[in-house]
Image: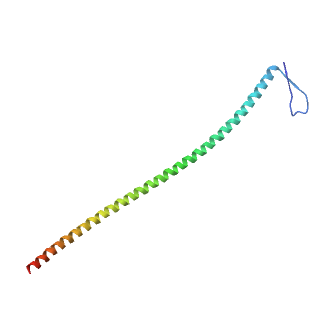
């Protein structure tokens, strides 16, 4: 058995006869080539999809890094506020102690003056 092969772009209509074995090899190579073209197209599409996923994941990672930076800044700000509140509380405690000492001093002084004044009034 032999196959008649001709070129589609050849103007000359001469035909080439191929041996059955060689014709089978040519057909096999053509089928393999077609399959490889399809596989190459699919792999290219897969690569494009993977690149898009990579870009999306990079965007997600950058967003997460931004969130971590924001949370870190918030945490630092809260620590600063906590330190300021602690300092204010300590200052207020010290001021309260001073005010209590002054109040005690004036109470004692008023009591002494009251006793001395009362004694003076009684002794006159």
Query: Looking at the picture, how far across and down is residue 65, in whole percent?
Result: 52, 49
In the displayed structure, 41 sits above or below 103; it is above
Query: Looking at the picture, how far across and down is residue 66, in whole percent?
Result: 52, 51
Residue occupying the point 31% across, 64% down: 92
Instruction: For the N terminus, give its image quadrant.
Output: top right
Which image quadrant is residue 102 in?
bottom left
Query: Looking at the picture, how far across and down is residue 40, in whole percent?
Result: 70, 35
Residue 14 is left or right of residue 65, and the answer is right
Residue 27 is left or right of residue 92, and the answer is right
Residue occupying the point 72% across, 31% down: 36
In the displayed structure, 50 sits above or below 75; it is above
Q: Among all residues in the image, which is located at the extreme front? A: 122
Q: Among all residues in the image, which is located at the extreme left? A: 123
Q: Report the coloring of the rendering.
A: rainbow
Residue occupying the point 56% across, 47% down: 60
Residue 83 is left or right of residue 95, and the answer is right
């Amino acid at each position: 058995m032999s196959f008649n092969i001709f070129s589609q772009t050849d103007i000359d209509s001469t035909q080439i006869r191929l041996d059955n074995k060689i014709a089978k090899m040519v057909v096999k190579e053509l089928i393999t080539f077609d399959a490889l073209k399809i596989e190459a197209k699919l792999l290219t599409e897969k690569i494009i999809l993977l690149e898009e996923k990579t870009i999306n994941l990079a965007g997600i990672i950058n967003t997460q890094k931004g969130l971590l930076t924001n949370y870190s800044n918030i945490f630092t700000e809260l620590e600063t506020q906590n330190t300021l509140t602690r300092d204010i509380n300590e200052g207020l405690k010290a001021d309260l102690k001073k005010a209590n000492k002054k109040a005690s001093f004036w109470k004692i002084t008023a009591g002494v003056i009251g006793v001395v004044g009362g004694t003076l009034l009684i002794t006159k």
